[in-house]
């Protein structure tokens, strides 16, 4: 007897940007019950990216490093065919900056523009005359709330796009807002889309990296927001643009684990587990490059390279027996 159940799911993921369409089948072979789960990871085509750049006096070398290496960042995001990019500073009062607080520097940059890289590079060079009391959360709240979201910043957010926040600062947020308020706003704007935060931060020890000594004395609000959105924190020390590009590549692959379904609470026969990509059987291996099964949690765990391989060569088919 053959039972067929198709569940077509498009999952809203905690981080960008793999949606997975799944087919779930059960089949009786005499007294045995076998399950087949077939799916193909697919990458979203759209991403909205906000760079929140510290424009205080200590950021000059970090800004130059970033501006020189913009192509590395856009290459890391090249899986998205359509990018909107915008730049904010950490200054939230007009008395310290020529840039209007909460208004995107030079507007919205669209990757379809032939001058996209040049314009984004110029916008990211925000200068170092900003407020010494950095308030990136306040800038975000203004930029993504009324009236600016419907006026000066109109057209940046798209309903079908994932959202990245990229913080580049050598200290913590010092505004009145906390990470939970920012996350609630983001989820209001992007209720089902993927959201992720990447944060480049300096060391609290100025002997290790040019940074602010108060870093260690302030609540880690930026890191907490990064944790809420499943993102990454990387170092501004050294060639941080490579660190940022690597963080983007890792974050793009979101569905790194899969809970295997069962029938009537039966247990999975681990020895029967088989995984194929296309027509190729892929044995379990190192999580750095392949996949493996965590029997304690009934989870399949995937590496980034393996998910990318499956997206190109799939579908992925998982077969196993339940007892």
Image (spheres, rainbow, N blue to C red):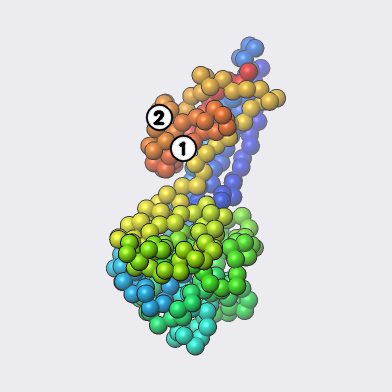
Residue holding disc 1: 302
- Counting other residues with Cα less than 10 Å from the Cα at mark 1, is it few (<14), some (14-19), or many (20 or more)? many
Disc 2 on helix, strand or loop? Answer: loop
* Residue 8 - label: none
State the residue in front, 31 or 264.
264
Q: What is the CA distance from the residue labelled 1 to the residue labelled 2?
A: 10 Å
Q: Considering the image in quadrants, where does the N terminus appear?
A: top right
On screen, residue 287 above or below 295: below
- Say whether disc 1 or disc 2 marks the residue closer to the N-terminus: 2
State the residue in front, 2 or 49.
49
Give the x, y percent position of residue 321.
58, 20
The residue drawn where x is 43% and y is 81% is 130
Q: From this viewpoint, which residue is outermost toward the bottom?
A: 95
The residue drawn where x is 49% and y is 54% is 231
Give the x, y percent position of residue 170.
41, 68
- Counting other residues with Cα less than 10 Å from the Cα at mark 2, is it few (<14), some (14-19), or many (20 or more)? few
Residue holding disc 2: 285
Q: Considering the image in quadrants, where does the C terminus appear?
A: top right
């Amino acid at each position: 007897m053959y039972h067929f159940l198709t569940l077509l799911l498009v999952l809203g993921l905690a981080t960008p940007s793999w949606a997975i369409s799944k087919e779930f089948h059960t089949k009786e072979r005499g007294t045995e019950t076998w399950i087949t789960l077939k799916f193909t990871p697919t990458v979203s085509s759209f991403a909205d990216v906000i760079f929140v750049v510290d424009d205080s006096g200590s950021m000059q070398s970090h800004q130059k490093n970033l501006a020189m290496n913009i192509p590395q960042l856009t290459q890391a995001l090249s899986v998205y065919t359509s990018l909107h990019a915008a730049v904010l500073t950490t200054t939230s009062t007009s008395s310290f900056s020529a840039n209007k607080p909460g208004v995107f520097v030079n507007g919205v940059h669209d990757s379809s523009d032939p001058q996209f890289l040049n314009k984004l590079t110029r916008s990211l060079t925000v200068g170092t005359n900003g407020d010494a009391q950095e308030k990136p959360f306040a800038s975000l709240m203004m930029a993504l709330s009324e009236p600016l979201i419907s006026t000066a910043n109109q057209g940046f957010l798209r309903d079908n796009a994932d959202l990245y926040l990229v913080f580049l600062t050598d200290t913590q947020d010092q505004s009145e807002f906390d990470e939970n308020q920012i996350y609630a706003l983001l989820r209001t704007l992007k209720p089902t889309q993927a959201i992720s935060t990447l944060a480049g931060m300096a060391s609290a020890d100025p002997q290790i990296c040019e940074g602010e000594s108060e870093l260690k004395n302030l609540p880690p609000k930026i890191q907490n927001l990064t944790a809420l959105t499943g993102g990454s924190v990387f170092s501004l020390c050294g060639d941080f643009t490579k660190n940022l590009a690597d963080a983007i590549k890792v974050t793009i692959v979101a569905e790194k684990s899969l809970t295997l379904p069962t029938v009537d609470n039966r247990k999975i026969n681990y020895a029967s587990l088989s995984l194929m990509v296309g027509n190729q059987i892929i044995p379990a291996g190192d999580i750095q490059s392949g996949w493996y099964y965590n029997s304690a949690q009934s989870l399949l765990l995937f590496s980034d390279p393996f998910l990318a391989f499956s997206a190109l060569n799939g579908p992925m088919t998982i077969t196993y027996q339940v007892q």
